[in-house]
Each structure stands twice: as C-alpha cells, then as structure tokens.
C-alpha cells in the first residue's frame, strides 16, 4: 500500500477499520478502549499492520526468500506503577472485549486521573510509502546476483559471497481513552554483504551493511551496493595479514561512526528511565553530577530524517525528540516513556518503544550520538605511544547495573610511536561504562553516524536503532587479546 499522498490516520483507518472483511468498527474500538481505561492513569490501544520480507543469496544462488504479514492489537492500562497488557493477532470486537476485561483488572478500585495526551505534531521524518510495493521481487534478486558477480570480479581470492536484502512496512495507530488518535507509517530497508577470501590456506571474512527508513532504491543503487562490496572486501583482505591482538591495559582510540555501538550499550541503556527510576542503573541518583570527562556531550535524537532509529512518533504516540543526556560531562537527562516519566515527575521524551503489538512499550534509545569535539583523528593517533585503534565492532555484552562491558573489535590496528601499525585480530575491549566516560581525553571533529544497521535488544524485544560518534581517545581500557 502506498501512503505518500495520504495522511497516516487515513491510511491506517483503511487498514484497520475499512478493509474488506474488517470486523472491528472504529467507534466500537474507541468506546471499548475508553471503558477499559476509565479508572487508569494512562494507557492506549495500539493497532499494527506489518509487511516484512527477506531475500538472501549464497553460493551464487538465492538461498532463502520469505514474506510475512501481521495484523494485531495490544491494549494497555496503567495504574500507579502497575500495568496490565493484553494482545491479540486479530482485530475484532470480541478480541478487544476480552483484552479490555483482562487489562481493566489492573485499575480495579483505582481512582486514576488520565495523564495528558501526547502533544500533536505534523512532522514526518520519512516517506510513508511501502518499500515492498515499490520494487519488483525479480529486480531485487537481480541486484543480489550483480553483487555476487561484482565481488568475485574484484579479487580472485574471493571464495564466497553472501548478500541479503530485507525490508518492512509498519503502519500503526494509537487510540487513547480521551479520544486522541495518532498514526505513523514506517518504511525500513537494509542491505548486507559479506565476503570470504582465501590466501595461502587462510580464510577471512569481511562484511558491511547499510539501510534506513526509505525505499529499496537507495540501497539497490549501484553506487551504494558497490561501496558495500568494496568495504566488505577491504575488511576481509585486511584480515588476511592481521596479527594476534595484544592484551593488557593500554590507550585506545575508537573510530567514528559504528563504534558508537559501545556508547549505546555501555552507557545508553544506563540512561533509560526505567532503570533509573528503579535505581538499578549505575547512573541512578547522579542527575546534575559529572559522570564524564569535559567535552563529552551525548544526545539521543529520534528526529533525524530517514535514519534507521528515527520515529515520527513513538509507540505511545509521543512525537520523537532530541534529548540531551550528558552535556560537557554533566548528566542532565534520561530517556523516558510515559509511565516512567509520570512516576519521576518529568515529561516523556518520545522514547516509548515496542517491538510489535504483542509487546508493551518501555523506554528505548533511538539514535544515540556523541557530539563532535575539536581534535583531529591524526592528533589522537600521534599522541599514543602504544595502544589500539579500534575502527569497527562486532558483538558485545553489558551489565546495566554495574556498567561492565565486553566488546569485540572486527577491525583494529596497533598504534606504535604515534603511527597506525599492523591490523590485529581477536581484540576485545573490557571495561565499565561510567568509568570509560571519565577516561575520554580527546574528542574528534569528525562525528559520523553508522550506516544504518543497528538493532537493540532489551527484555526480549528488538527495535531498530542508530548510533554515532566522532573519533575518541581513551586514556586506558583493558584490551583482551592473544598476545602479551
């Protein structure tokens, strides 16, 4: 379904209430939801329609292709700190009445006053057209075949090529007890390329991905997918000559862009409202205090056009915002959904997110970014006697309560006597998020966003996110490797 010339409310009304065979009337939906939330402090009926597909190529052939359509609803009632949630994979009056009977129990005997509705917004951060309808399936498979041929033609050492295209179209409408209705139409596409190279019996892999909230045409343009192949091949060939990573405490320079995933995981989660309200975050109770080195400013910005982590409105209907979390090293904000904001006496920040209609919302990041400073990357490298230059990251883990993290670097180099040296393999960064913030000694002038590949997990829910940062120098982190 194309939505470019229609309002999100008009499109979602047709999807949820006016389509052929629809068994839920809008008036009935509003009436039942209002009655279920009559004694509650907050809540909403969340309606969702989603189309999603994936196509993958391996060994020169399309190995998998899938398409899925989902339609469902979730009803939430909030009373004090308690929340009742029920969902159904159908839109019908009987299903909604069953959900209403379930969630209304949480407010039984509660004399709640319904919270103010989200403020209205006419902003639209991305085109609401369905990307799956804008390009034929055969055209997408042709692009994957061209990627395979291009990669193999670039270097005779290429032994394997894996490429995939994924896309989705999500339409949501949020109905509140006070009659406020909010809707959003969300496209999302992603291209991933991985290559395996072999030389002298040694095999190495490189990968690159890109995407965002736009049509497939952006990532299937030859200039885009060729860059993805070139970058994946560069990493793979680089790894052929990599040495075992050193181990120990040392200075670390983090590259710009995707290395912001360390910021996201080690620091961003600790600044979400629920963890701080419950005082389980390492940052709880530190508002207004210095938690990072001077020059460190971190924002969460869901208003960046076409970015993977951006949202016109969040999954509670609050317009997305730009929230300053740390300013010049001082903690000045948390990320809030409606429930935690109300209980903490602050305004929601537009960070109430959910994976789907089957999940209740909670505070989540959108695009989490450290702003640029004054130093050049070359200055930072020159200032390091012996250290590690980590340009790209793979996976990682973090403990929200303690802030401890472990991240693996997928592309890293030794720094020796102020110069970038040999590439190393198997480097992991081990540290503590709050402590790492205080060890930032230089902030680069080259802030960059990631290429559009992030997915964040929390409490079993995954949502698309973005990260970004300039090149950073840290005075000391523990590097785990294979050589002393």
Image: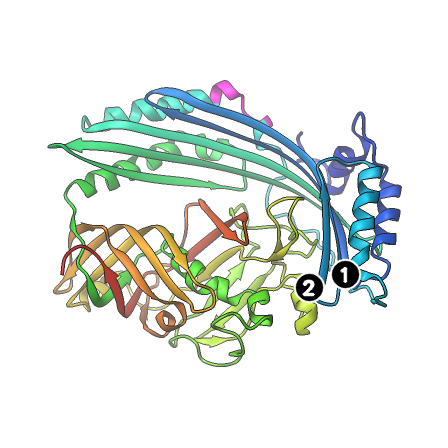
Give the percent coordinates (x, y) of residue 246.
17, 58
Query: Which residue position holds label 1?
Result: 42
Q: In the rendered view, would you say 175 is above or below 384?
A: above
Question: 190 or 448, which lies in front?
Answer: 190
Query: Which residue position holds label 2?
Result: 339
Residue 271 lies left or right of residue 472; in this view the side is right
Give the percent coordinates (x, y) of residue 408.
31, 53
Residue depicted at 41% across the width and 46% down the height: 451
Give the percent coordinates (x, y) of residue 167.
53, 34
Residue depicted at 50% across the width and 32% down the height: 216
- Graded by Cα atoms within 10 Å as few (under 14), some (14 to 19) or many (20 or more), the crowding at tag 1 reads many
The magenta segment: 133-139
Where is the N terminus found, in terms of image quarters?
Answer: top right
Which secondary structure, mark 1?
strand
Looking at the picture, the colour scheme in use is rainbow
Which secondary structure, mark 2?
helix
Disc 2 and disc 1: Cα gap in Å?
A: 8 Å
Residue contact between numbered discs 2 and 1, judged by CB atoms under 8 Å: yes
Question: 366 or 63, which lies in front?
Answer: 63
| Residue 144 is one of the magenta-drawn residues | no
């Amino acid at each position: 379904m194309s939505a470019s010339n229609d309002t999100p409310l008009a499109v979602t009304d047709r999807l949820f209430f006016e389509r052929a065979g629809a068994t839920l009337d809008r008036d009935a939906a509003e009436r039942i939801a209002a009655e279920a939330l009559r004694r509650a402090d907050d809540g909403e009926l969340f309606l969702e329609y989603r189309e999603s597909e994936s196509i993958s190529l391996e060994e020169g052939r399309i190995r998998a292709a899938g398409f899925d359509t989902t339609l469902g609803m979730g009803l939430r009632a909030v009373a004090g700190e308690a929340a009742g949630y029920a969902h159904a994979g159908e839109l019908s009056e009987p299903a909604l009445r069953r959900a209403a009977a379930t969630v209304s129990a949480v407010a039984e005997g509660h004399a709640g006053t319904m919270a103010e509705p989200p403020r209205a917004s006419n902003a639209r951060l991305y085109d609401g057209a369905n990307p799956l309808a804008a390009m034929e399936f055969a055209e997408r498979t042709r692009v994957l075949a061209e990627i395979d041929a291009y990669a193999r033609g670039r270097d005779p050492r290429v032994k394997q090529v894996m490429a995939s295209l994924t896309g989705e179209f999500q339409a949501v409408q949020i109905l509140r007890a006070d009659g406020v209705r909010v809707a959003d139409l969300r496209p999302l596409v992603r291209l991933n390329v991985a290559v395996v190279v072999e030389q002298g019996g040694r095999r190495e892999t490189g990968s690159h991905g890109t995407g965002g909230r736009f049509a497939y045409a952006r990532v299937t343009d030859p200039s885009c997918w060729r860059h993805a192949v070139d970058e994946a091949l560069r990493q793979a060939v680089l790894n052929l000559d990599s040495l075992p990573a050193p181990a120990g405490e040392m200075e670390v320079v983090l590259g710009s862009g995707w290395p912001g995933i360390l910021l996201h995981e080690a620091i961003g989660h600790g600044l979400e409202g629920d963890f701080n309200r419950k005082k389980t975050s390492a940052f709880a109770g530190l508002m207004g205090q210095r938690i990072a080195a001077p020059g460190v400013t971190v924002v969460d910005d869901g208003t960046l056009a076409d970015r993977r982590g951006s949202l016109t409105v969040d999954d509670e209907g609050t317009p997305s915002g730009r929230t300053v979390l740390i300013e010049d090293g001082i903690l000045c904000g948390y990320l809030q959904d409606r429930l935690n904001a109300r209980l903490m006496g602050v305004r929601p920040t537009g960070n109430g997110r959910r994976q789907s209609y089957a999940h209740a919302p909670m505070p989540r990041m959108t695009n989490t970014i450290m702003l640029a400073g004054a130093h050049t990357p070359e200055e930072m490298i020159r200032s390091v006697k012996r250290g590690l230059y980590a340009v790209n990251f793979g996976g990682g883990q973090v403990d929200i309560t303690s802030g401890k993290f472990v991240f693996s670097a997928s592309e890293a180099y030794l720094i020796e006597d102020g110069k970038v040296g040999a590439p190393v393999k198997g480097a992991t960064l081990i540290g503590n998020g709050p402590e790492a913030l205080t060890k930032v000694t230089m902030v680069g002038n080259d802030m960059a966003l990631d290429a559009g590949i992030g997915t964040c997990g929390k409490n079993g829910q995954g949502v698309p996110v973005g990260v970004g940062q300039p090149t950073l120098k840290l005075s000391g982190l523990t590097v785990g490797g294979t050589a002393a």
